[in-house]
Image (cartoon, grey):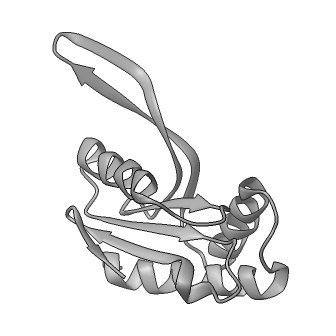
Amino acid sequence: MTENDIAKAIFQAELEVHKALGPGLLEGVYEECLAHELSEMNLRVERQKMAPLVYKTTRITNAYRMDLVVENKVVVELKSVEKMNELHVAQLLTYLKLSGYKLGLLMNFNVPLFKDGVKRLINGNLET
């Protein structure tokens, strides 16, 4: 599957979770339900994936943690906040840069209309 195929499947799964649960729950609840949906679609999902960082001559084994990595190709960062801001975008951009993944999805479940909470980042560029 390509990154775009995976992203479409992730979006469908997230939409299903949002329709079933609605806004207002903790991020961890959405993460667990989304991981379940993706697994049901026979997609490989890693939750809370720790990744290393090399700073000059120092290697930090568990420098950051990505909410979900799907099929070892797409990073999914989940939020349940009143409003996403530039710091949320910067966080995912940093994860993409450090990990080498090409595609990231930033998802805020705390919105009445799910499509309003979705941001797609490709190679450091934001697409809404």
State the quadrant of the C terminus: bottom left
Q: Residue at x 54, y 63 (%)?
A: 44
Q: In this rendered view, identify the residue nearer to me: 116 or 13.
A: 116
Q: Is residue 13 left or right of residue 74?
A: right
The residue most toward the top is 57
Image spot of residue 103 (x, y percent): 31, 67
Q: Is residue 64 left or right of residue 53?
A: right
Image spot of residue 8 (x, y percent): 45, 86
The residue most toward the left is 56
Q: Residue at x 76, y 68 (%)?
A: 33
| Quadrant in which residue 115 is drawn | bottom right
Q: Is residue 18 above or below residue 64?
A: below
Is residue 81 in view?
yes
Q: In this rendered view, identify the residue nearer to me: 105 or 10.
A: 105
Instruction: Count the numbered circles shown.
Output: 0
Q: Is residue 80 above or below residue 97?
A: below
Q: Residue at x 36, y 63 (%)?
A: 73
Image spot of residue 9 (x, y percent): 51, 84
| Quadrant in which residue 88 is drawn | bottom left
Q: Is residue 12 above or below residue 95?
A: below
Image spot of residue 96 (x, y percent): 30, 52
Q: Is residue 79 left or right of residue 21?
A: left
